[in-house]
Image (cartoon, grey):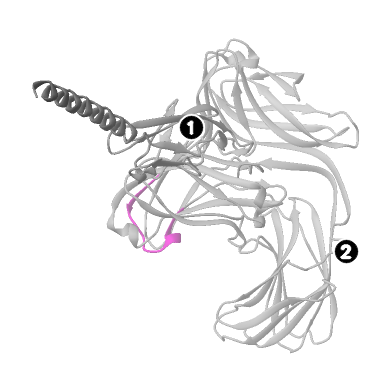
Amino acid sequence: MKKNKIKIAIVITVAALLLAFVLIGCEEETVNAAPQVDGAHYFDCIVDTPVDLLDGVAALDDEDGDITPDMAITITPEAELRDNGYAVFPEEGNYRVTYTATDSTGRSTSESVIVSAVERELYMDFSEVSGFKCTTSGGAALTYNGMYDGVYRIKASGAEIAEDVSLSRDFTLTGGKEYRFSYRYNSNKAGRANILADGDAFAVKEIFKGENVLEFSYVPLNKGESAEVEISVLLGALEEFEFYLFGAEYTFAQNIDGELLQNFSLAGRVHGRFDGTNGNAWVSEDGKAATLEVTSHNVDIWRGGMFIDTDLTVSAGVEYTVSYTIVSSEAKPFEVVLQRDQYNEKKFDTYSVSDATTASRVSRTFIPDADNAGDFWIYVQSGNEVNNITISDLSVVAKWDGNKTEVITLKDFVSKQADGYQGELHTFGGSFTYTIPSFAPTDWQQQVIGPEFYVGGSGENYVVTFKAKASKPVVTIFAAVKYGGWDPTWVWSRFTITEDEQVYTFFCNSAGGNRLNNFVWQFGSQANQAYNDVKIEISDVKISYKDATLD
C-alpha cells in the first residue's frame, strides 16, 4: 500500500505539472496583442497649407477596437500640428511623420513616413511695390524693404559692391524706341549706381544725397518687337544706406490711329442695375446690341441702368472717339456716360438725351488724364421713366501722335471708414496692422483695401494666401474684387481671424482674370462689437499659381 500511495502521489504531481504547463501555454496564447497602424503612406503637400495627416490612416487594436482618436503624431523637424490631425508645414523640405498607437494595456506600435512639403509657384508678393522689388546678394541685408505707411523705403547694410543691392522692375518695351526714365527719390548717402537691362549694364549714374531725380535712357534691341525688360538700379556702392522711392515714370514716342473694338460682342459684358426700380438688361443674339428695359420707376432717383464693360484700358493723353447707335421706345430723358470703372465718379463724358425714338449715330470724344486713366466702361441710365433703350454697333477709335508718359504710382494698403467709425492703419513691407477702438455693426464701415494688381489668364489658376492674427477673435470678410468696383468678385469668404497666427488660403474662381483687381478686408460686425481696442495683423500677402497635382 505504501508503494501504491507513492505511485499515486507521483502521478498526481506529474498531472499537476502537466496541467500547469498547459495553463502556461494557454496564457501565452491569450497575451494582449500590440495595436496596428494601418494606411500610413508617403505623400507630397503644399507649404503653409493645412493637410490631413489622418487621411486614410487608422490605429486598430484587437481588444480596444478603433483607437485612431488616441493616436499620437509627431513631426520632425517641428511643424504645426492641430488637434484634428491637420498639420501645416512652414517651409519646403522633407519631414518625418511618426504615428504611435497605444492600447489600454500600454502596448504601443509606431510607424514613420516621409512627407515632402513643396512651395507653390509665386505669382505676386505684396512686399513688391507697383512691380518694384529690392533684392540683395553677398553680405548685404535689408532692414526695410517695401511700403511703410505710404512710402517705399529701402534700408540696407553690409553691401560691398554695386551688385549687392538691386532695385528692379519689369517694363514692356518695344525694340528700337528710346525710353526716358525718371525715378524720384531721397537718399541719405551719395554714390554711383549702375543701370542694367536684363542684366547688361548700359549706364552709370550719380545718386545724390537728399531729394533728387535719377534720369536715364534706354533703347531696346529687336526693333519693332515688344518684350518684358528688367530694368535694375544697382545701389550697393552706397554701402550702408537708406533710400526712399517716391515714384517713377517713363516717356516714349507713340503713334496710335486705329479702331480698338473690332467685331466687338457685348455678350457677357452687360450688367443691369435696378436699385429702386424694376427692369431687365439683355444682349441681342449677334452680340452687337444691348437693351435696357425699365418696367417701373422711382421719381426721386436715377437707378434704372446698365453697365457695359468694354474690356479696354484707356491711357492718359490719348484721344478716344466712341461711336454708337442709340434708340429708345419713349421720348423720355436718359444718359449715356463714358467713365472709368463700373462704379466711379470719374466720368470722361456724359451725353444727355431727351428724345431718341428715331435711331441716330452718336460720336463722343474724350482725352483721359493721369488721374482718371484706367478701365473703360459705358453706363446707360434710364432717368426716372419707363423706357426701352437700345445701344448698338459700338466703336472706339484711339488717336495719338507724340510723346507718351507712363506714370508709375507707388500704392499701399489704405483704410476706409464710414459713419464715424475709426481704425488706425500702419503698413510695413507688404503687411499691415489695423487697430480698431470699437467695431461698427456693418462689414464695410471698417475696411482695409489693397493696391490694385493685374491677373492674367483665368482667376481659377490662382491661390491667395496670407498670415493673420488678432488680439481677439475677429469675424472678417475677405474679398478679391474687380478694381474700381465690387462685382465680379473672384474670392469672397467670411471667416474668423484667431488669436494664434495662421495661414489662410483662398482658392479663386474664374472671374478674376485678365483685369485689374484688388483685395478688401472688412471688419465691421455685430459679433465683433463685444470687443474694444483690437489689433489685427495681416502679413505675407501672396498670390501663387494653383498646383495642378496637389490642390
- Quadrant for residue 418, please give it: bottom left
Range shown magenta: 434-447
Q: Residue at x 32, y 37 (%)?
A: 103
- Taking the image as drawn, is residue 246 in sight? yes
Of residues 235 and 466, the one drawn nearer to the viewer in this rendering: 466
- Quadrant for residue 24, please give it: top left
Counting from the top left corner in percent of width and height, residue 50 is at 49, 42
Q: Is residue 445 magenta?
A: yes
Q: Residue at x 87, y 33 (%)?
A: 175
Q: Is residue 227 magenta?
A: no
Q: Residue at x 82, y 74 (%)?
A: 392
Residue ID for mark 2? 263
- Against 360, residue 295 (above or below) is below
Of residues 300 and 305, the one drawn nearer to the viewer in this rendering: 305
Q: Amino acid at mark 1?
A: Pro
Counting from the top left corner in percent of width and height, residue 549 is at 65, 42
Residue lying at the far top of the rendered structure: 160
491 with respect to 175 (left or right): left
Counting from the top left corner in percent of width and height, residue 530 is at 28, 57
Q: Amino acid at mark 2?
A: Asn
Residue ID for mark 1? 90
Residue lying at the far left of the rendered structure: 2
Please name which of the two marks, 1 or 2, marks the residue nearer to the observer.
1
Label 1 to label 2, Cα distance in Å? Answer: 50 Å
Indicate the quadrant containing the C terminus: top left, top right, bottom left or bottom right: top right
Q: Residue at x 40, y 42 (%)?
A: 60
